[in-house]
Amino acid sequence: MDNSIQNRLVEAIAPYRDRVDYLEVRLEQSEATSITFRGSQLDAVDRSFALAGGIRACHKGGWSFVTFNGLAELNNRIEEAISQAHLVGSEKTELAEVSPVQDYVKVELGRDPRGVSLDEKRQIIENYNKLLLEFDPRIQTTMVSYRERFGLTYFVNSNGTCIAQERLDISGGFGAVARGKGGLVRQGYESFHSRSDFNAIIGIEERVKGAAERAIRQLEAKPVKGGQYTVILDPYLAGVFIHEAFGHLSEADFIYENPRLQELLQLGKQMGIEQLNVVDDATLPGLPGSIKYDDEGVPAQRKYLIKNGILTQRLHNRETAGKMHEAPTGNARALDATHPPLVRMTNTAIEAGDHSFEDMISDIDEGVYAVRMIGGQTNGEMFTFAAAEGYMIRNGQIAEPISDVTLSGNVFQTLKDIEAIGSDAVYLNGGCGKGGQMPLPVSVGGPHVRIKNVVVGGR
C-alpha cells in the first residue's frame, strides 16, 4: 500500500469538511488483462493500467459525483463536487450513522495471475476454445473469454473513515452455439471465477465441455407445450430467480420513494412457507460478491431478507437506511471508482431446506424441470425467464428433454407457491447490471426448488 496516496487523500478533504454535510473520495489503481476468442479466431487481447477516482459530496440532501484521473487535479475536482452539491441540495441530508474505520484489506493470493505470461494464458484459453469447436460437428461457433483484474482502492470520507482494499477477480466465459436441422440454433454457456488463484482455470475441461453438451442436447429437444405446471428449478435457476425477481425489489432505493412497493414489502409480512429463507451474505469467503467493506466504508454483513417465510430486512446504503430509519447493511457498491455506489446485492441465495431431489419429483404426474437461464426480464413484480434447458417430469421421473421453456409470473405469488426446498444448495458466480454499471461481480445460489402453478410458455 502507498501510504503517501492515502495521506494525500486525507489531507485533500480536510479543509472542506465544514462546507458540505458529507464528502468522500475513492481512488483506484488497477491492472487488467482480457483475451477473447470468437470461433477459431483470436478476437482480442487487451492489457490496461489505470489510476482513476471519484468524489461524492452531499449537501442538504443534494448529491454530486465528479471523476478525476490523477492526483494533480484532485483539489479542483473536490471544489467542483462541492459547488454542484450546493446547487442541487434543498432538503435535509439523512445518512445512517456508521462508526469510522481505518483498515487495510489484503488479497490472500494463490498463484498470482500477474506473474503468468500472456502467452500461457492465451494457450490455456485457446485449448478450451478448441475443445468446444471440436466437440461435435454441429457446434458452429464459440465465444470464449478470459479476464483478470487486480485493483487497490483507497477510500476516505469526512466522517474519519480511511480504508484501502485490494481485490482480485479472475473469470472466464465459455459459450458454444450449435446448429441443427432446419437452421435451428441453440446455445450453451459455462463460466468460472476465482478471487485468489490463477490455477483455478487449469484442469476444468469437463466443465467447459458442459457448454457444448447443453447446446447439442437442446437441438434434440422438442418445444414444451404451454400451460400451467408444477416446476422444479435447478439451483442455478433458483438463484437467478431470487436475485432478479426478488433481490432487486429488496434494494431500498427502489422502495423508499415507491408507495406501492412499500405496501407490498412491509417488514413482518408473510412471503412464503416457513422453510423459505433468503439471504444476502457478503461475508462468505472467496465468492464474487464477497467484500469486507462496501463502497461507503460500511462493514459487510449477512442479512436475512426472508427468515422462516417472513420479510425481515432489506438492502441499504447509508442514505436509504437514514431515510427509512433502518440500519445500514453494507450494500453500497460501485463497478469501480469512476462510478457512484448504488444499492446492490452481494451473494444472494435461497438457503437449503430438507428435501431430496427424488422426494421433490416423486409425486409429480406431469411437470417441468427447468435448468439454468439464457435470458429474462423483470418489470416491477412481474418476471419472465427463459430456461437454458428443460425436461418433462412424468410419473415422478425425469423424462424427455424440452426446449423453449419460459417461466413467467408475479414474484410475490410465486414465492407463496413454493412448496418444497431442496437440501442441495450451491452458490454460482454471476454479473449484475443496474444503473449502467455492469457486470458487477455477484453470486447467486440456492437448492432445487419446487413451485406449483407456474405459467410455462413454449413456442
Image (spheres, rainbow, N blue to C red):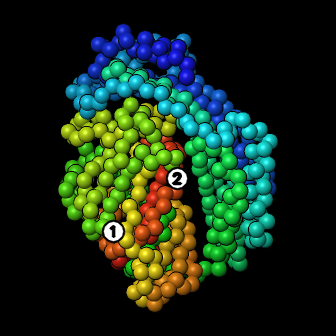
> Residue 263 occupies which quadrant of the picture?
bottom left
Residue in view at x 42 percent, y 45 percent: 283
Q: Amino acid at mark 2?
A: Gly
Q: Residues within 10 Å of mark 2 (few under 14, many from 20)?
A: many
State which quadrant residue 269 falls in: bottom left
Q: Using the image, determine if residue 195 lies above or below residue 75.
A: below
Numbered mark located on residue 430 in the image: 2
- Which structural element holds mark 2? strand
Mark 1 to mark 2: distance in Å? 23 Å
Which residue corresponds to the image point at 20% horizontal and 39% vertical from the top-left?
A: 325
- Tell which tag, 1 or 2, sits nearer the viewer: 2
Give the mark nearer the N terminus: 1 vs 2.
Answer: 1
Residue 429 horizontal side relative to residue 247, left or right: right
The answer to whether any part of residue 254 appears in the image is: no
Residue at disc 1, secondary structure: helix
Residue 168 vertical placement versus 338 (above, below):
below
In depth, the one of 4 and 56 nearer the eye is 4
**Which amino acid lies under the numbered mark 1 shown in the image of this protein?**
Thr
15 sits left or right of 187 in the view: left
Residue pictured at 42% horizontal, 81% vertical: 359
Locate residue 185, reporting x and y percent. 66, 70
Q: Is residue 322 visible?
A: yes
Residue 414 circle label: 1
Q: How many marks?
A: 2
The location of residue 20, given as percent across then percent down, is: 30, 18
Q: Residues within 10 Å of mark 1 (few under 14, many from 20)?
A: some
Question: Residue 209 at what x, y percent from top left?
Answer: 69, 65
Determine which quarter of the picture holds residue 321.
Answer: top left
Q: Is residue 88 above or below residue 304?
A: above
* Location of residue 210 in the rendering, given as x and y in whole percent from the top left corner: 65, 66
| Residues under numbered marks 1 and 2 in contact, where contact means CB atoms less than 8 Å apart | no
